[in-house]
Image (cartoon, helix red, strand yellow):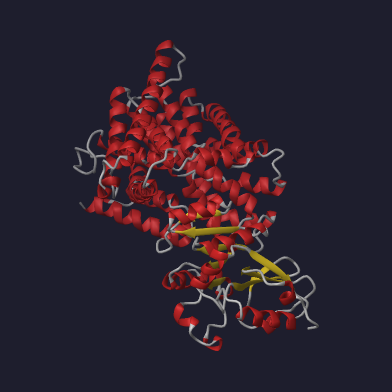
Amino acid sequence: MLELAGIIILGIFAQWLAWRVKVPAILPLILVGLLVGPVSTLWTEGGHKLIEPLFNPDSGKGLFPGPYLFYFVSLSIGIILFEGGLTLKKREIQDVAPAIGKLITVGSIITFLGAGLAVHFIMDMSWAMSFLFSALIIVTGPTVIAPILQNVPLNRNVSTVLKWEGILIDPIGALTAVLVFGFIVSGHGAMEFTSHALKEFATIVLIGLAMGTLAAFTLQQMIKREMIPHFLLNVFTLALVLGAFVFSDVLAKESGLLAVVSMGMVLGNLDVPHLKKILYFKESLSVLLVSILFILLAANINLADLELLKNWRCLVLFGIVILFLRPLGVFLSTRNSGLSTREKIFISWVGPRGIVAAGMASLFGIKLSANGVPGANYITPLVFMVVLGTVLLNATTARWFAKLLKVYQASAEGILIIGANKAARTIGKYLHDNKRHLVIVDSNAGSIRKATELGLEAFQVNIYNEELNEHFELLDMGYLVAMTSSAEVNQFATQKYQNLFGEKGTFRLLTPEEMKRDKSELPPRGILSYSDDYLNLNEAVRDFPDLYEVPLQSRQHLLRLMKEFTKRPKSIPIFIKLTNDFIKVVPYDLDSIEIQDGCQLVYLGQKLEEAVTANKGA
């Protein structure tokens, strides 16, 4: 009982520590696992591990008897891979830049072939184990890229490439590793191109794909026909994932992983109601499973396995993977892409391997070692070496290297709008058309759909939880504008993110109570419009859904126009557009604005007559 509780406590603590210091969670998880596992044998009485995953009948210690550790790891990895498959959208592959598409195809092929050749000739491993290793290290993954990107403000080109590579290559790399493993199993531990081996491999692929696809369509139809009550939706999905895994494995040994990966990919690309809720549940479950899993897997490694890494050949292999194959894949994939040489060098440097690589390496290592496959004992420590090495290297050097190569984001000029109502969409469209990076978030799916139909970048997000922090699209945000119908939500958003955006970077709408006060009683900063609230803005936009620009000749001209707006409730001033095209909110103190030739006042609603906007000798 103490060991089980300890694993969960240590796992969640490691996740919290990773969040706190902004490093990938896999780093503290594996280090904690090694500390309570093989490293602890150096000081414990009798040389026993503090946490022993495998039950030892002689000592009476251990958590999982016989093959049950393998079963737990298999099912856990299956759930994690299903969640990863859900995130792979066909439209996202079609929409990403050609450079990213090549990076996940050409780059993956170069890593697969190059690392396979390297490990075969350097480590003298069989072709089967060599290419299993190379398939496993294809994967980077969003869980290791995200903390690095959130901690290092990179320019948009670099952050976009790294973000999409991490998201898209996760399920693709997992699928490649599963297929290679299936081929090895069908060849009974070797990559044999015999008719029997090829037949077994084809059976694994066909059964896995068929079971995954069938399970995905079954779940979609059951949800659409409301055959599953809302409160059972998440656990029913979990049961179906496990059922598909086990049933597929019964029909064709080792096809279960392929079944859940394909189930996730198919389901993620179908029209499924409540899919986002399923994804959130799987993400939460994955956090718990990952926390338990990687402490168990790291603790299961023996000191003798770690001794293998003392071999100088391991360092050479690591160097080839990081310093040769990664840059080669990046530079070949990004030819004629518009990326600068410095940007390509930085992307080449940042390629940390993550949770899927380490988890699947342990799973395959356990399985193949149990079957007596030569060289299988090398798989887990070698992949762990690459995972820990790349995470440590990238997490500690990314900021310094970004500054050295000048791919650092000098200033954050993006604008985040909380709320996707009509006024927010209209203002957002104007900002988007004026070349400002804009993102709109709202909890209402219908409003988000209308925003995306306008060509805006919009996401369904609940700001009361941590969803907002998970979006890579917000990395270059410098300003937040909260303009929902709820004054409480607007105030919560500005207070919560004031540390991130600063007092001069957060704006909200006036509350109904503030509308009744004199302007002198209002906050001197942080308000979008000092004359109108949510109702006024949306009533004006409902009747006149446009924004207009008025050239300003002087401060007196601006002051006269502002007086005119008080007489016209359907015309509302919002921005001052400066001579360098920088757009800022109309400030509390108009005397703080320096009016130069080319400055413009931007307002929404009913268009003013030319006689009103003209500068009458001011």
Q: How many marks?
A: 0
Percent x, y of residue 196: 39, 12
> What residue do we see at 38% from left, 34% from top?
263
Where the C terminus falls, by quadrant?
bottom right
Please name whichever residue, 454 or 219, is drawn nearer the observer in this view of the structure. 454
Could one spot residue 482 in this view of the protein?
no
Percent x, y of residue 146: 51, 52
For residue 591, which quarter of the picture? bottom right
**Side (left or right) of 32 relative to 498:** left
> What residue do we see at 67% from left, 66% from top?
548
**Side (left or right) of 402 relative to 178:** right
For residue 602, which quarter of the picture? bottom right
Could one spot residue 192 in this view of the protein?
yes
Which residue is outermost to the top?
Answer: 195
Please name whichever residue, 263 or 45, is drawn nearer the observer in this view of the structure. 263
- Give above or below for 390 relative to 607: above
Percent x, y of residue 95: 58, 41
**Side (left or right) of 160 relative to 304:** right
Please name whichever residue, 514 or 381, is drawn nearer the observer in this view of the structure. 514
Percent x, y of residue 290: 36, 47
Please name whichever residue, 528 or 171, is drawn nearer the observer in this view of the structure. 528
